[in-house]
Image (spheres, rainbow, N blue to C red):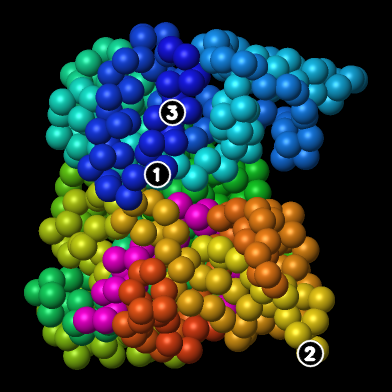
Amino acid sequence: MLLAEIVDTSEAVASTPARSEKINLLADLLRRLGPDEAEIGVAFLAGSPTQAKLGAGPATVYGAAAEPAPGPSLEIADVDAVLEEIAGTSGAGSKKRREVLLEGLLRRATAAEQEYLRGLMVRNLRQGALEGVMAEAVAAAVEVDTMRVRRAAMLEGDLIGVAARALVEGPESLNTAVLEVGSPVQPMLAKTAGSAGEAIEALGAGVVERKLDGLRLQVHRCGDSVTVFTRNLRDITTQVPAVVSAALELDARSLILDGEGLVVRSDGSPLLFQDSMSRPGGDGHVLSPFYFDVLHLEGVDLVDEPLVERRRALESVVPSVSRVESIVTDDPGTADAFFEASVARGFEGVVVKDLAQTYEAGRRGSGWLKVKPTHTLDLVILAAEWGSGRREGWLSNLHLGAVGPDGEYVMLGKTFKGLTDEMLEWQTSAFLQIEDHRRGHAVFLKPEIVYEIAFDGVQRSTRYPGGVALRFARVKGVREDKGPQDADTLEAVRAFLR
């Protein structure tokens, strides 16, 4: 397949706001991929090369210059081969060798293809083909229910691999997806509720767990081997020796645990989020694991079991001191009291969970409802404005964005509140490194940085394209553990109107 076909589809997907049309465009191209092109084509459409690391940063990629080709001739397999060679280049003279390879590739590409390739290599293609849309497109291409694709991708933690296999081997290959100890599973996520009592009323009865504001951990043990992954499926095993040691002390040879890593004081109360997130296990801080779920135990997968059964399995292998504190209740007042006590102890809030809920890996399911004392959202910083007065010379007023229904970012308003001088200095430097363009006194950014934003409420607004705006928005901090794809959705923001 010609790269031009990928580029044309990418441009068409980016230009249409209709989710159904995006899916149709992607599915049509996926059906045309040959067996040897499936993985490459899915990866390129998803906005990522097949190589984990290219070794060529934005300066190299955008610094390479070449006259564009007069017409399309590049095959996607040719592109992948060159990128593989770039990724494999190392040692003395490797920088120059990468530049030569990159310039040679760009000379074979048209102007549109050059622009696409640069965005692909730095993983900054804003084409609206996010994972949810891609999963639906793959399902349409192989004519199966979307949930089958999502489930396989969630279990294997690899939508691209699952999609390529389904396109080549057929939809029956989706049935082969199973949990594999040592291979990360996309974690289940929680939606937001107004209060613990309201959540219990909605569920009828449930577990109310303390919400730990730490580092999401997924711990895999196979015999004497332990691997630890973060929420983003990053392997941090070598950074958390205490977590590894604790896992080896458990009376089980095969397991997958879900929980949080937290730095705690001697009385059990938590330190600040930054102390748990930055340099896990460093600076004299010991990251302690606290588990709330188990996905696999001694050869048995538990993701399809209800929470009540998974809790029994968890209690059979993890001591209470290493489990997240919780209660089971059907009384809204009891749930609210547990929430207040948790917040008073310094915890972030609670998560209320349906006892009948299976583990929906990778999904923000309605069976898990998080409650915080202050409304917060994780939003993408779309732009920042140069400050005035004492903030002159610093990028200050932030443009806040949520993920819209088409995968593009929708502005919700601005804020400069909550920014310390240290934060202003840091973000000015960081933002200028991801600058996209300028307009007036605003510097518009590539959507890469996520902030946690506190706010008092949401109001209707005709000023912003999403039709809503945040009231009294203020910065709580940078979410270094989250990428732009993890930001809250416009739907979640609008829910606060109700």
The answer to if 478 sits in the magenta stretch is: yes
Viewer-proximal residue among 349 and 364:
364
Badge 1: how crowded within 10 Å, few (<14), some, or many (20+)? few
Q: Which residue is mark 3?
A: 8
Amino acid type of the residue tagged 2 in the rendering: Gly
- Mark 3: which secondary structure? helix
- How far across and down, in percent of the image, does residue 320 sit? 37, 65
In the image, residue 219 above or below residue 329: above
Give the mark nearer the N terminus: 1 vs 3: 3
- How far across and down, in percent of the image, does residue 77 sit? 52, 12
Q: Which residue is mark 2?
A: 389
Q: Which mark is residue 206?
A: none
- Mark 2: which secondary structure? helix
Q: Quadrant of the N terminus?
A: top left
- Mark 1: which secondary structure? helix
- How far across and down, in percent of the image, does residue 490 sit? 34, 66
The Cα atoms of the two marked residues, 2 and 1, are separated by 40 Å
The Cα atoms of the two marked residues, 1 and 3, are separated by 11 Å
Amino acid type of the residue tagged 1 in the rendering: Ser
Q: Which residue is mark 1?
A: 15
Can residue 145 be seen by looking at this rendering? yes
Looking at this view, name the residue that lies furthest to the front: 70
Badge 2: how crowded within 10 Å, few (<14), some, or many (20+)? few
